[in-house]
């Protein structure tokens, strides 16, 4: 289980995360939602240790990540798959090399096994016939999917996805949502997803945390979110005509 | 003050760079790739500059010898000495600082601003070592070879210009380049080259690695990489010459 206890983070006097405490459930899709600029990406980077927190602790089970040595951290990281908001594919490598990369670095698989595994992951994100292309030669949505394939190739125990379906059409976005939720259940991993897409929230939100201006503003699940009394949350959830109409004609 | 903290940061980064590699065979592949990237791909520009500089040194020297007591083979001798001692190791290294320094800083800088370095780190890889160590190793292996090629080409350029312009006969020139030859001079040049190769790749890697921001900052890092590695080369040249030739 991943737990954040009272974490705060600021950049040059600008407080981005203000005393956030959260528990993420294993085997479930944990969603962090919030407006653009509310601190979701910063929170995720703090959780995985890419950004140091100013105060507070982050626990992976019983281990406090700020107190780990480089090697202990390395062991945890080999269990982490992460999708970055900007995909972060290696542009010197082809699509298939990107997906195989974590396997090349850390598994003892033979080349054929690695290729099989990478092809399997690419198929799960609905990508075929792009193996030999470079990231600069595929579309933004395809990059996102390759990045997801790379994040899951090494069978992670913790999966972090920063906006997995922004920039995707509704249908592919839904495929990705379902994929993330399936993998989570299938392999019993702890999944944390940043999103501001209400479709994902309703589809996969086992546990939802709403961030507003760096503060944790609301917590609940996908059923509770539609009937909450929290005004700031409702402002966010019912910000579009579509959701407002659904609310008035359920 | 900035420079002191930068030097401190640079040394700390170097410590991470020389950490034991996780998967040696992958590093080996990377080194070969970088040898091609940084070394083989620089041969064209090095060849052109070397031939022409050698030619100019020879012509300049002949023009400056107007005393009939000085034998003509001095031209070959002077060309050889200036090429081996300074031109090839130092000037060509400065040119390589411009070429491979900016290449390394912009490559690593772009990886930083597009979060590719974060992606490496999150996989449990030591990105500093993974990205910078193969480049340092490759340059330290291939630059001495590039410099030796440059020496031959410069001297060849000198010979060609002497013969073509008729300013110095082939026989005089060839006698001159063999006259009072100390193999230690080549040794000295190669030691310098290896030190310069280390400075260029590590300083440029440092600037790329600590790029913050976007495309604009990548450009700035690569400029800084070239300027700082050039300054480092000039300073190291002074120190090494004092140490090795005094
Ligand atoms: N490296 C940084 N330096 C300074 N400020 C930063 C840095 N990274 C993020 N911020 C600030 O932190 C705040 C939160 O950013 P963050 O990227 O977490 O937003 P977000 O919730 O992920 O938004 P989005 O949905 O648009 O991705 C922003 O106001 C941003 O300006
Ligand atoms: Mg974000």
Image (tube, coloured by chain):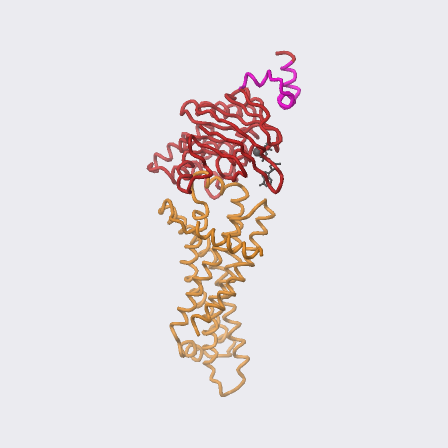
Chain colours: A red, B orange
Q: Is residue A233 magenta?
A: yes
Which quadrant of the rendered structure holds the C terminus of chain A? top right
Q: State the residue lying farthest toward the bottom.
A: B69
Q: Quadrant of the N terminus of chain A?
A: top left
Q: Is residue B102 above or below residue A35?
A: below
Residue A146 lies, with reference to residue B235, above or below; the image says above
Q: Is residue A159 above or below residue B31?
A: above
Looking at the image, in which quadrant does ligand 2 appear? top right
Q: Nearer the viewer, residue A223 or B156?
A: A223
Residue B80 position within the rendered picture, expressed as x and y whole percent measured from the top left = 45, 74
Determine the residue located farthest toward the right in the rendered image. A241
Range shown magenta: A221-247
Q: Main secondary structure of the magenta part?
A: helix
Is residue B25 found left or right of B229 in the rendered image?
left
- x, y percent for residue B129: 43, 48
Taking the spot 52% from the left edge, 77% from the top edge, the residue there is B61
Frontmost residue, B88 versus B113: B113
Q: Position of residue A194 (x, y in %)?
A: 54, 29
Residue B216: x %, y % from top left: 61, 48
Numbered-mark total: 0
Is-magenta flag for residue A80? no
- Res. B155 in view: no
Taking the image as drawn, is residue A93 in sight?
yes
């Amino acid at each position: 289980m991943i737990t954040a206890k009272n974490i705060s983070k600021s950049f040059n006097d600008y407080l981005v995360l203000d005393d956030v405490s959260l528990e993420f459930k294993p085997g479930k899709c944990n969603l962090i939602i919030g407006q653009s600029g509310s601190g979701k990406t910063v929170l995720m980077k703090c959780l995985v240790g890419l950004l140091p927190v100013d105060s507070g602790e982050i626990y992976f089970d019983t281990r406090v990540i700020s107190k780990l040595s480089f090697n202990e951290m390395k062991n945890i990281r080999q269990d982490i798959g992460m999708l970055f908001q900007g995909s972060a594919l290696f542009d010197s490598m082809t699509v298939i090399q990107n997906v195989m990369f974590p396997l090349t670095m850390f598994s003892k698989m033979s080349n054929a096994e690695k290729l099989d595994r990478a092809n399997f992951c690419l198929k799960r994100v609905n990508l075929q016939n792009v193996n030999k292309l470079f990231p600069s030669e595929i579309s933004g949505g395809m990059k996102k999917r390759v990045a997801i394939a790379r994040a899951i190739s090494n069978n992670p125990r913790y999966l972090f996805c920063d906006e997995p379906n922004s920039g995707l059409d509704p249908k592919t976005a839904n495929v990705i949502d379902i994929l993330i939720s399936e993998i989570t259940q299938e392999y019993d991993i702890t999944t944390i997803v940043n999103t501001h897409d209400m479709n994902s929230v309703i589809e996969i939100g086992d546990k939802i945390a709403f961030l507003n201006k760096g503060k944790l503003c609301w917590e609940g699940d996908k059923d509770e979110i539609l009937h909450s009394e929290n005004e700031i949350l409702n402002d966010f959830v019912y910000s579009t005509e579509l959701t407002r109409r659904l609310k008035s004609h359920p | 003050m900035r420079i002191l903290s930068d030097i401190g940061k640079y040394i700390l980064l170097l410590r991470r760079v020389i950490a034991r590699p996780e998967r040696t065979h992958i590093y080996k592949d990377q080194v070969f790739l970088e040898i091609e990237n940084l070394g083989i791909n620089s041969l064209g520009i090095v060849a052109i500059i070397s031939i022409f500089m050698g030619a100019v040194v020879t012509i300049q020297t002949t023009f400056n010898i107007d005393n009939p007591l000085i034998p003509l083979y001095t031209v070959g001798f002077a060309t050889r000495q200036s090429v081996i001692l300074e031109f090839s190791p130092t000037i060509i290294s400065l040119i390589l600082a411009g070429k491979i320094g900016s290449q390394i800083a912009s490559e690593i800088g772009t990886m930083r601003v597009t979060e590719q370095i974060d992606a490496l780190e999150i996989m449990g890889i030591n990105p500093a070592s993974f990205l910078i160590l193969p480049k340092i190793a490759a340059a330290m292996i291939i630059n001495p070879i590039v410099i030796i090629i440059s020496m031959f080409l410069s001297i060849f350029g000198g010979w060609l210009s002497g013969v073509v312009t008729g300013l110095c006969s082939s026989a005089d020139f060839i006698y001159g380049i063999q006259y009072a030859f100390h193999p230690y001079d080549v040794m000295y040049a190669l030691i310098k080259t290896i030190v310069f190769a280390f400075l260029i790749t590590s300083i440029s890697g440092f600037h790329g690695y600590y790029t913050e921001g976007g495309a604009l900052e990548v450009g700035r890092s690569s400029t800084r990489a070239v300027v700082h590695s050039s300054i480092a080369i000039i300073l190291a040249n002074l120190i090494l010459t004092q140490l090795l030739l005094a």
